[in-house]
Every structure is written in structure tokens, then in C-alpha cells.
Image: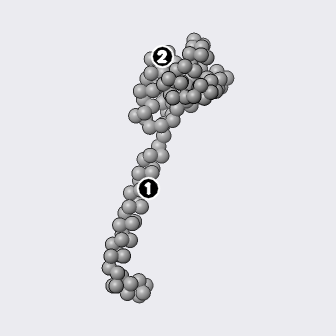
Amino acid sequence: MGSEKNMLAHYPHLGSFRLSFQEDTEEDVLVLEEVDRQNEIVLYNDDVNTFDYVIEMLIDICDHTPEQAEQCSIIVHYKGKCTVKTGSYEDLKPRCSMLLEGGLSAEII
């Protein structure tokens, strides 16, 4: 402890540097927690839309590859639902609205 005080006497800027570093670290953690929060669009099975139509919608609206869209449509068919897109609520809201307007059954969770 005595050597730390002696060192701070010779290098007074180290004390403020340490405090700034702690503040920056706390701020970084808060930002990471906000970014980490993700929502999901869940697509539900229906007896109306064809596989081809669902695949086309997932490619156009959710930016799926053809393979990804086909896999999701198969999961929806056999399991009843599938998460088709994750992200921020602001990104997912218009996508989910377009899926609903297209006649698909979906929600953001």
C-alpha cells in the first residue's frame, strides 16, 4: 500500500487513469447487455399456404437462403412452429408484419 502511494506521488496520472478505466469498463458492460437482448419471429404451421409460397416469403422477407427457407418450412410443417429470424424488435417488427400481410401466421417473442 505504501509503495502504491509512493508510485502515485511520482505518477499522479495513474490514479485518474485507473478510475477512468473502471468507468469505461462499466459502460462497456451496459452496452453489451443492451445489444445481447434478441427477439425472435416464430412462424406457425397452417393448412393454407404451400411449401413453395412459405419458402418464397422467407427468402424475400427474412433474407433466408433457399436451403434455410426450405428447412424452416419443413420444421414448421412437422413441429408446428419454427423460429425464422432473430434480432432487435425494430428490425423484426416490419418483417413480421409483411409475413402476416402475406397470409402467414407469425409473431414476435
Residue 57 vs residue 8: left or right?
right
Q: Position of residue 105 (x, y in %)?
A: 52, 20
Query: Disc 2 or 1, which lies upstream in sequence?
Result: 1
| Residue corresponding to mark 1 | 29
Q: Position of residue 64 (x, y in %)?
A: 55, 28
Q: Is residue 51 visible?
A: yes
Q: Position of residue 33 (x, y in %)?
A: 45, 50
Q: Is residue 12 above or below residue 95?
A: below
Mark 1 residue element? helix
Seen at 46% across and 25% down, the residue is: 96
Seen at 41% across and 27% down, the residue is: 94
User: If the image is split into quadrants, where does the N terminus sit?
Assistant: bottom left
- In the displayed orientation, state which residue is furthest to the top: 48
Seen at 39% across and 66% down, the residue is: 21
Locate residue 15: give its quadrant. Answer: bottom left
Residue 16 vs residue 77: left or right?
left
- In the displayed orientation, state which residue is furthest to the right: 78
Seen at 59% across and 25% down, the residue is: 66
Circle 1: residue type: Val
